[in-house]
Image (tube, grey):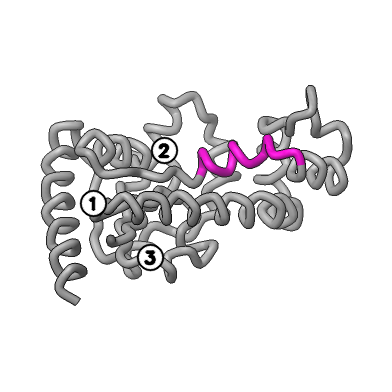
Amino acid sequence: MILVGITGIIGSGKTTVSSMLSQEGIPVIDLDKLGKEVTDYEEVVRNIQEVFGVEYIVNNKADIAKLREIAFVDTATRKKLEGIIHPRAGSELWKRIDQLKAEGVPAVIVDAPLLFETGLYKKLDKVVVVSADMDKIKERLRLRGMGEEDANRRLPHQIPLAEKEKMADHILYNNGTEEDLRKELKTLLSRIKEWEVRSSCT
């Protein structure tokens, strides 16, 4: 089994590509979703309350919206939050990978926005970066309802796309229409098949 990480920056289209890969029958593990799931764990809720205060807990659950607000304002605060959530999400990730491996799945996609930032890429076999021009990205974020100030606050917390591209095994460009993206996806699917074959021969 090969593990293929997929990443990008907010607005580049990573989630759309992951969804398309899932539709093609390749299992996708979304680390963002895992992060949100583990915030409901009793021990995580307790840790968040201890570190950030009871005002960040609502109905015995972490207030995700409120935590997100502070996470993108202060780096030290973000690091504290990541220190609580990332280890639990990582543990759950490998449990699911082991389960899929036991089922004989040939390839698994790990969708992770902070793939490089957290060092997770070192534990995967291949990395795909979904890239797009910055004007396209900002337009998508605007259409998504994200203000320019919010976007400018979030983007600096991620390694720039140009740097991520240098570390990628495959770059998928998402500057055009959905039809253009699906053509790019066909190329990626061929690459994944090649990686599977090479993996099975080694």
Task: Please say whether residue 34 is one of the residues in the magenta stretch.
Answer: yes
Residue 148 image offset from top left, x and y in percent: 53, 35
Residue 117 image offset from top left, x and y in percent: 52, 62
Task: Please say whether residue 29 is one of the residues in the magenta stretch.
Answer: no
Q: Tag 1: residue type?
A: Leu
Q: Secondary structure at mark 3?
A: loop
Which residues, given as a range, are shown in magenta? 32-42
Nearer-the-camera pick, 24 or 113? 24
In terms of image quadrants, where is residue 176? top left
Residue found farthest to the bottom:
202
Q: Earlier in the sequence, mark 3 or mark 2?
A: 3
Q: Residue at x 24, y 55 (%)?
A: 106
Q: Residues within 10 Å of mark 1 (few under 14, many from 20)?
A: many
Where is mark 3, residue-wise? 124
Q: Earlier in the sequence, mark 2 or mark 1?
A: 2
Q: Residue at x 50, y 67 (%)?
A: 119
Res. 138 mark: 2
Q: How far apart are the two marked residues, 3 and 2, measured between alpha carbons?
A: 30 Å
Q: Quadrant of the N terminus?
A: bottom left
- Report the side of 169 relative to 48 (left or right): left
Where is mark 1, residue-wise? 172
Q: Residues within 10 Å of mark 2 (few under 14, many from 20)?
A: some
Camera-side mark, 2 or 1: 1
Q: Residue at x 23, y 49 (%)?
A: 173
